[in-house]
Every structure is written in structure tokens, then in C-alpha cells.
Amino acid sequence: MSLSKRILKLIEEKSLNASRFANSIDVKRSNLSHIISGRNKPSADFFLKIKKIYPEIDLNWLITGKKLKKDVNFMTPENNSIESVVVFFNDGSYKKYSQ
């Protein structure tokens, strides 16, 4: 599925038309139209505006067409205990607190 089709699918899933979607993410309708038609490529700012208004959107899917596999990019600790905490002070010094 092309980027244009993914954007159109997003607009449809949000039950919006292109004008309302453009208004919701604060871009000009003509800019959205040019992106959907393939005339222009979307900027990083375009995607950030979408993520700001629709945080549930998987930007990896929107940009590449592939779902983000959470287990690939996020490490889970073997245990949930905190070993130590480090506090940094404005003068450049720090203090480490351990249990």
C-alpha cells in the first residue's frame, strides 16, 4: 500500500474528509492534496503534526507500511527493581543513592 493510500485510510478511519483532516493537523488543504497525489513528499513536520493530534497512530506504519514490532525496539528489564538513583546537580557534581 502506498503512502497516499495509508494517509487516505487514516483519514477514512477517523471519519473525516481531507479538508477536516488538514485542519485538524494544522496543514493547508493544498499541501495535503499534493502529498496525497504524490506531487510532494511529506516532511517530518507533517508526520509530527499527525502524531501530536493522533498519538495512537503508528508512524512506522504510516511512513513505511510496516507495523512496529514493539519487542524488537524495546528492551524489558529482567527484574523491575531499582539498583540505584543518580542525582545531578547544577554545579556538575552528582550523588548516587543505593539501597
Image: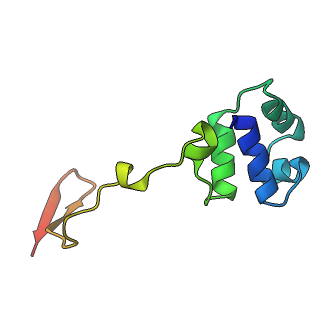
**Residue at point 86% right, 35% down?**
33
Q: In this view, does 38 lie above or below 80?
A: above
Q: Residue furthest front?
A: 1
Image quadrant assignment for residue 63? top right
Q: Which residue lies furthest to the top in this view?
A: 39
Is any atom of residue 25 visible in this view?
no
Query: Position of 84 compared to 70: left or right?
Result: left
Q: Is residue 49 above or below residue 41?
A: below
Between residue 8 and residue 46, name the one nearer to us: 8
Between residue 52 and residue 87, name the one nearer to us: 52
Q: In this view, does 35 lie above or below 87?
A: above
**Residue at point 71% right, 43% down?**
6
The number of callouts visible is 0
Q: Which residue lies furthest to the bottom in this view?
A: 99
Q: Is residue 53 above or below residue 39?
A: below
Q: How is the image coloured?
A: rainbow
Query: Position of 18 compared to 56: left or right?
Result: right
Q: Where, quadrant-wise, is the N terminus in this rendering?
A: top right
Where residue 25 sits: x, y (%)? 76, 50
Q: Which residue lies furthest to the left in this view?
A: 99
Between residue 7 and residue 43, name the one nearer to us: 7
Between residue 9 and residue 98, name the one nearer to us: 9
Query: Position of 17 compared to 24: left or right?
Result: right
Image quadrant assignment for residue 81? bottom left
**Residue at point 69% right, 57% down?**
53
Where residue 99 sits: x, y (%)? 9, 76
Where residue 98 sits: x, y (%)? 10, 71
Is any atom of residue 92 visible in this view?
yes
Where residue 61 sits: x, y (%)? 59, 45
**Residue at point 88% right, 41% down?**
29
